Image (tube, rainbow, N blue to C red):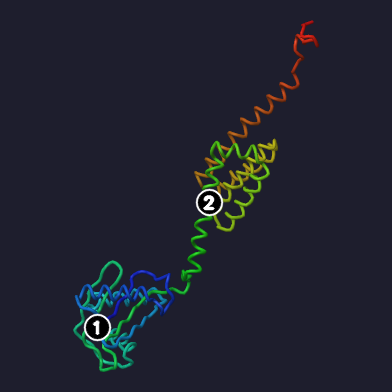
Amino acid sequence: MIVVGIRQHILAFERPLQERRAMLSLKRSVTKHLKTSLSNKTSSKNSSVAISDAETFRFVSFLLSVEGSAAYPDEFQQLMAILGQICTNKSAEMSDFTQWEDDDWRYAVSDHLPSSDISLGVVLVTYRPRDLLPLYMASARRAVGFVHAVVALVTANAYISTLGGGHFLCQHLDRSTLMAKLQIAISMGLHDPILESKCRVNLAYNALQLGRFKRARKILRKEQDVAEQLDSSELRKVCHAANVYLNKLYNLHKEQILLRKTARPPRYQECGNGEER
């Protein structure tokens, strides 16, 4: 028996020619469909074929479908002969194929196998583009860490936008400035200009708390230009909210200066014995 299965999705978590999980999934599906066990075969051989070209993979996938084998019977026979030769190392014509497909696989099974030392040959066909970085376990952990960094960065931005975040900015300006710079570095590493611009707005908030209104206004003008270049409505809203806060804080600052200049001593002063003059 020769079993050919083509995976309709990219196998990114398994190394080429070492697709153990995919091979087990293929055998389970064939066993379930044919209602026969493949484990009772005395000798078997598993092989896999990785196709890097997208057009070639689509054509092979089409040939292994019922419509493709009916439209191109000669090409289908040649393809099955080549795949069967991978297992048996012998060229021979095969016939009487059973074909079906599901959401993940397309199958072609033939009971006829060229005379060889094996009784079962399983061929797994996969799509492996050259520009795809295979997600092995080491790179999978890095990918998970990358997602965690993004979530932590977005969470920190949300925290700064709340009342508790504002209290933190007021009480710990040195730490909040360092955190904003760290956020900018992370967002630059993520190549996310919108997120980077939001983090720079946090620097403007820090400058406001230090009373550096010109610096804060300069930062916000730059980020407003970035928002227009990126055409980001969300970033425009963030800059608008920061500008509203800047104007209110600046007006309050001017009122305090005015009160200090026009302040007068109290009309009555208490004496040391508690009596009024």
Q: Nearer the viewer, residue 251 or 228?
A: 251
Residue highlighted by disc 1: 40
**Residue type for callout 1:** Asn
**Mark 1 Cα shell of 10 Å, populated few (<14), some (14-19), many (≥20):** few
Residue 227: image x %, image y %? Answer: 55, 46
Relative to 189, is 244 above or below?
A: above
Residue 254: image x %, image y %? Answer: 69, 27
Residue 6: image x %, image y %? Answer: 32, 75
Residue at 46 percent of width and 74 percent of height: 130
Locate residue 100 relative to residue 216 in the image: left or right: left
Residue highlighted by disc 2: 152
The quarter holding residue 204 reads top right
The quarter holding residue 60 reads bottom left
Quadrant where the C terminus sits is: top right
Residue 25: image x %, image y %? Answer: 31, 72
Residue at 43 percent of width and 73 percent of height: 129
**Mark 2 Cα shell of 10 Å, populated few (<14), some (14-19), many (≥20):** few
**Residue type for callout 2:** Ala
Q: Nearer the viewer, residue 15 or 86?
A: 15
